[in-house]
Image (cartoon, rainbow, N blue to C red):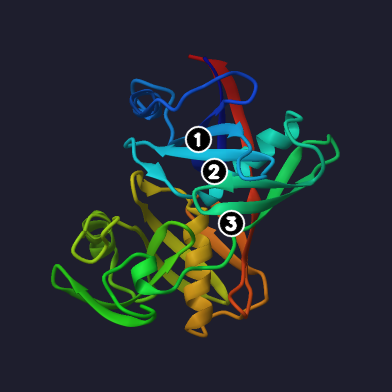
Amino acid sequence: MRFWKYQGCGNDFVLVDGISEKLEIDVPWCVKVCDRHFGVGADGVLYLLPGEEGCDITMRIINADGSEAEMCGNGIRCLAKYASDFGIVKGDEFSIHTGRGKLIATVFKGDDGKVRTVRINMGAPILEGREVPVNFDGRFINQPFEIDGVKFRANAVSMGNPHFITFDDIGEENVRRLGPILESYREFFPRKTNVEFCRIEDGKIYITVYERGAAWTLACGTGACATTTAAALNKLVPFDTPVDVHLPGGWLKITVDSKLQYVLMEGPAELVYEGTI
């Protein structure tokens, strides 16, 4: 099988093309190929598939542990770059069907005609607790929370997949300890959660992320969107203005609409190599 290895801010993926050849989603194969010792190594597998519900193309993503994610911000930029660079889609703006519905991609190309950065309209953030989902009625924004003896204030936001965000300094030891504990804390997160530990400095957001199904990763695009939304709601950063968001693997620019009708994410996507397996 032919595959392409992509990365967006260090969040890396194996992409397979189900438009150029017929493919069926194979979860055990995805787990095997994501293994960094016995496979290619990746945070997840991106399936490019024919468009559904009037969209130009479809994205499905299987995490390294075999679970399926509703959305992946870094992954969708990589998929958009592949689709544009290889002529699967025409024009610089096109639609992608995802687990959270129809999203619009805009690609920006270099002098060589290849895509350098991608902007995705990620749609409206989901703030109602039961829809995120968390076991809480109403918005869970800047609310007190305690787990495993650690108290902090936190926020729950979904960008099609759930995120739990804190801007409190709980110490590096607690960050490393609580990441996996929070992800799997089903009592509060019925579908598990992604976890973002954040700080804001000079108007920029710095994030450490524990991803649902992928553990500690270098970046999380939906996490950057959810975090910037939470920061804007807490009046820590402005609405309607691109905010620089730093993840261990690089920078993204996130803009949150003041009416909360959409969030724009712009960042890089890079083809690392291609091969057969």
In the image, residue 103 sits, relative to residue 83, either above or below, namely: below
Helix, strand or loop at mark 2: helix
Distance from label 2 to label 3 (Cα)? 15 Å
Helix, strand or loop at mark 1: strand
Circle nearer the N terminus (1, 3): 1
Residue at 57% across, 77% down: 202
Instruction: Residue 75: name its quadrant.
Output: top right
Crowdedness near tag 3: few (<14), some (14–19) or many (≥20) residues, C-alpha within 10 Å: some
Depth check: give the residue in front, 202 or 184: 184
Crowdedness near tag 2: few (<14), some (14–19) or many (≥20) residues, C-alpha within 10 Å: many
Residue at 58% across, 33% down: 48
Q: Do the residues under discs 1 and 2 have CB atoms within 8 angstroms?
A: yes
Residue kind at label 1, given as amino acid type: Phe
The circle on residue 75 is 2
Depth check: give the residue in front, 117 or 87: 87
**Horizontally, is 208 left or right of 121 in the view?**
left
Residue 66, given in percent of the width and then of the height, sits at: 33, 35
The circle on residue 13 is 1
Q: Do the residues under discs 1 and 3 have CB atoms within 8 angstroms?
A: no
Residue kind at label 2, given as amino acid type: Gly
Helix, strand or loop at mark 3: strand
Circle nearer the N terminus (2, 3): 2
Instruction: Residue 41: name its quadrant.
Output: top left
Depth check: give the residue in front, 79 or 175: 79
Q: Do the residues under discs 2 and 3 have CB atoms within 8 angstroms?
A: no
The circle on residue 251 is 3
Outermost residue toward the bottom in this view = 235
In the image, residue 259 sits, relative to residue 263, either above or below, namely: below
Residue kind at label 3, given as amino acid type: Trp
